[in-house]
Image (cartoon, rainbow, N blue to C red):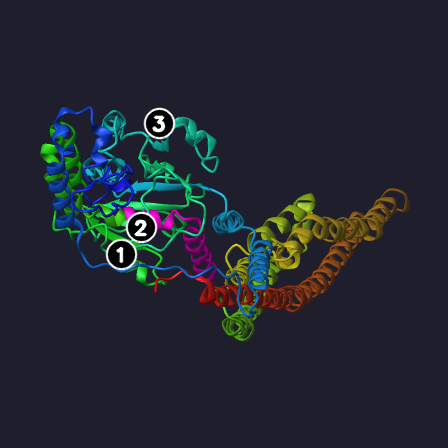
Amino acid sequence: MPLASSALTNQTQGQPDSRPTRLTAGVATSAQAVQKRRKSPMLRSLLSPRSATRATSILRHCILAPHRKLTTEAWQSSASTSHPQQKDILVQESLKRYLRWFPQDLATGSDIDTFFTLRRNLSRANNVVVGIIYENEKTRTSSNIIEALLADPLAGGSETWYRQLETRDKSENNIFTYKDQDVAQSLPEAFSRASHNIVSRSPVLDAETRPKFPSVLADQVSTPNYLQIVEVNKDEDVQKVADGCSFYVYVASDLSSLMATFPRHVQRKILLTVVDNQEYTPRSLETTPVPSLRDSEVTQHVVKVNSKALAHGIDAFYKLDTEAASQYFESIQASNMLEVSKLLSWYVRTENLRDWTFGLIKTEISTDTLSETQIRDVYDDLRLDTLVKGSRQMHEELQETFIPETEAFFRNKLRWYKLYFQNDNVEYAVKDFFSAHFMNKSIDSYNYLKGQLVARLQEQKFANYTENSRFQLNNPLQEYKANLINNRIPEEIQSVVYSSLISAFVYYQLPLSILSLVGYVWVGLDLQTSVALAGLGWMLGFNHVSKAWHEFTGTWLKTLFEDIRLVISKECMDEGLFKELNTRFEDAKELAKIKQLVISDLEAANDESKTRPE
């Protein structure tokens, strides 16, 4: 394919080079390069000196253009020290520190692992995986981005595997590999098994024959990498392969199309957005510089292409051979696919992919970072406003709602004489009342305030907070209520009911009743006197029950109310929320310091070690 071939070397006028060359994207080949297809009768005419001279003339017309070469600075690993090894160690320690304190950030953790691998393997070939994702089904169907990127029509036998690209099933996920290269182990095993593996001899995928664009891109420092392209055609699988892909190429039909439908960690790994339609497209040559590579701060690129135009040119070349050479060369330039090929060639290099991954890590770590000043402001607002209001509301509910309702219940629903009617049911009546009316708003308020502490002082995403500052579902009021209902009411109230009724009967009602009966039967008391004596006993018994119950409930309720006040003031506030606030505040400050230290190290390292053009 045009994009898959190496750069065209200059030929002496009328003298074909003895080395075999390929036609690259946007550049025609020399007459000598076409000898690879010497079996084609349509190319035999190109082998004459006259044809070679004509081909060279066409080439010069196509490729002569001003160009600018990009150069790369050597990677230096860290921040504030001058020795490269010391800087490298500092960056490594900073990233490991981040992993230790923010272990739940799995996406950034995966990028850090990738960065470490690329940093170690600069002199060894790596397997780079690039994901292709589409805006929607319409774009997936209409785009020829894969065909235009991988095709190599000047190579003998390339039409066979090119037609496989054209006829692939776009409803399934496809993995494009070079020759017998194994599928990348970084991809999920289940995804790899379910995907269609398409083998091609495209130079874009090959480590050795990939075009290097020497007139535009700097010399490569690292060992060339193999490339695998994963075309993710099932939207539900895009997120599954995010950690396995080095970066994504997002293909859309319109620049206004948004990537908001993708998860955040997928969006941040989109290195290149390709706007692919048949509207106006800038032309490009092999020597045309890529403007976005001049700015080292640019981490996401946008390219306008017309892949269908190049696909038509490739088809024409396969059908008509050299008769369609001019059409093919024109489609290369008109499609602007060269710019995509240059960007891929640049970022597939280990040193550039490492730098881009490092910038990705730095950006992600810097996102949603809280300063110590911000944390202090949150702490002061919680301490001086939120918790104070919460405490006041709890005391107001106790004084204005719970105490009046409880006193009214005991006064109206549990008068002393009702003990005789309810007896064993007194316990259940009291339990039902407290279950329904015991400081419900305050219990909810405490849970809300506790949630506020967590929400506002644990905003460091993915952080590893200490055991003391982790959210615990304990509520002193709820615990007091449970103990009151399950233990105190049966032990304290029901026992008083029994003792009052029994003591009144044993000490007053039974003795006087027996005495009146004996007097009437054996002593000779008249009936009226005997009844009066028995009635006196029962009245004294009732009086005893009334007095005992009144004294008990007054004392018991007073103790209950004071206990609740103490629970609110001490257990809920002083030893509860305020203590928890201080603990979470210290943890939040410590994590903010750690994260800021990591960011400072990475920022300083990035200033000295990022790759940028001259």
Query: The residue under label 3 is which amino acid type?
Result: His
Predominant secondary structure, magenta span: helix
Tag 3 or tag 2, which sits nearer the N-term? 3
Q: Nearer the viewer, residue 68 or 611?
A: 68
Comparing labels 3 and 1, the label whose residue is closer to the camera: 1
Taking the spot 39% from the left edge, 27% from the top edge, the residue there is: 194
Q: Say what secondary structure mark 2 lies in.
A: helix
The part of the chain drawn in magenta is 341-368
**Is residue 406 found left or right of 187 in the rendered image?**
right
With respect to residue 151, does 460 lie above or below?
A: below
Mark 1 to mark 2 CA distance (whole Å)? 8 Å
Q: Position of residue 590 (x, y in %)?
A: 60, 66
Q: Say what secondary structure mark 1 lies in.
A: loop
Q: Which mark, residue 290? A: 1
**Is residue 23 found left or right of 113 in the rendered image?**
left
Taking the spot 35% from the left edge, 45% from the top edge, the residue there is: 248
Q: Are marks 1 and 2 in contact (CB under 8 Å)?
A: yes
Does residue 366 belong to the magenta stretch?
Answer: yes
Q: Please identify the quadrant where the N terminus is shown.
A: top left
Mark 2 to mark 3 CA distance (whole Å)? 26 Å
With respect to residue 575, does 380 lie above or below?
A: below
Q: Which residue position holds label 3?
A: 196
Q: Nearer the viewer, residue 560 or 550?
A: 560
Q: Which mark, residue 343? A: 2
